Each structure stands twice: as structure tokens, then as C-alpha cells.
Amino acid sequence: MAQTRAQQKEREEIADSVADSVKDQAPGRGAGGDQKAKRGSSRSARRAEDIERRVSKAIRRVTGAVDRGVETYIDARDKSARKRRDGALVDFYENVTRGVSKAVAKSSPAAVDVAKAFNTKRSRRRMRASFKALRIPFVG
């Protein structure tokens, strides 16, 4: 398919204008695109972001585990109800225990996620210092 010279020139102009508009919209750049990109976060902000990321991961894990536990309970309840008359009421404690057990098992790594968020060099130093202060020399 042969293009006329006018069509080819028009396409090139459109491509150039698109490229210019994309360059102007680059993050951290001024209108001319000649400024330096902005630096990242400060140390304290990065630390806060890291804590927030890990804590939100733990929260997501717990909410997913609760959802899974409720799902397990509902499945067990429905199975009990199908098996016999008043089965859901008769097996209530067992079904709830099954659901809670599943939720606790799935959410247990959340504590590790939160602990990792606060396990820093500074906190370890503070802990060592407090243990040194609590040492009692042995007598005798």
C-alpha cells in the first residue's frame, strides 16, 4: 500500500507531537524536560513506608484468613444440615471450631510480618541496652 507524500508527512508530525507530549509529562521533570528527576524519599519516610507496607500486608493476610475461616464454617454448617435434621444446630460448636481453627492457621504468619516491620538496627540496640541494664551479677 503506497502512501502519498502528504499522508506520510502528516503521520510523522502526529508521531512527533505525541512524543513531545509524552516527554513533557515525564514524572519529576519540568516543562522543558531539562531538570533533574526528583530524589526518592528521606530515610525516615522510607522507614515509615516500609512499616506501612508490612503492616498492611499483615492486615491483608488476617482479613483473608478470616474470610477463609468463615467460608470453612459455612461449608461445614451446610454439610451438617444436609446430613440430618437440625444438623447445623447440633454440630454448631464443631463447625465454629473448624472455622476458627482454619482462620488462626492462615493468619499466624501475620505476627511475623508485623515483627519484621519493627525489627530494625535501632530497636535491637535499644533491646540490648535494656538487657544490659537488667543484668544482676551472681553472688557467691
Image (cartoon, grey):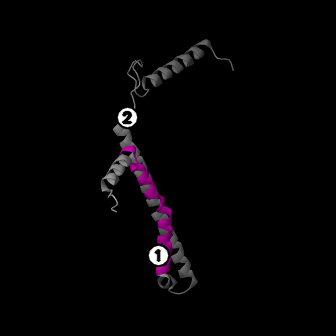
Q: Residue furthest top?
A: 5
Q: Quadrant of the N terminus?
A: top right
Query: On the image, numbered disc 1 is attached to which residue?
Result: 96
Dot 1: few (<14), some (14–19), or many (≥20) neighbours within 10 Å?
Answer: some
The reply to whether residue 91 is in sight is yes
Q: Secondary structure at mark 2?
A: loop
Q: Position of residue 56 (x, y in %)?
A: 41, 51
Image: 82 above or below 9 = below
Q: Is residue 137 magenta?
A: no
Magenta stretch secondary structure, dominant = helix
Q: Is residue 97 magenta?
A: yes
Q: Residue furthest bottom?
A: 85
Image: 13 above or below 44 = above
The reply to whether residue 56 is in sight is no
- Which residues lie in the magenta part? 93-122
Q: Residue furthest left?
A: 133
Count up the numbered dots: 2
| Residue at (52, 84) in percent of width and height | 87
Query: On the image, numbered disc 2 is attached to which residue?
Result: 41
Distance Cα–Cα, label 2 vs label 1: 46 Å
Q: Quadrant of the C terminus?
A: bottom left
| Residue at (45, 57) in percent of width and height | 110
| Residue at (57, 14) in percent of width and height | 9
Foreground label between 2 and 1 = 2
Q: Quadrant of residue 35?
A: top left
User: Which residue type does callout 1 highlight?
Assistant: Val
Q: Position of residue 2 (x, y in %)?
A: 68, 17
Q: Looking at this view, is 97 or 138 the one in front?
A: 138
Q: Looking at this view, is 21 or 35 the one in front?
A: 35
Q: Position of residue 31 (x, y in %)?
A: 38, 20
User: Which residue type does callout 2 highlight?
Assistant: Ser
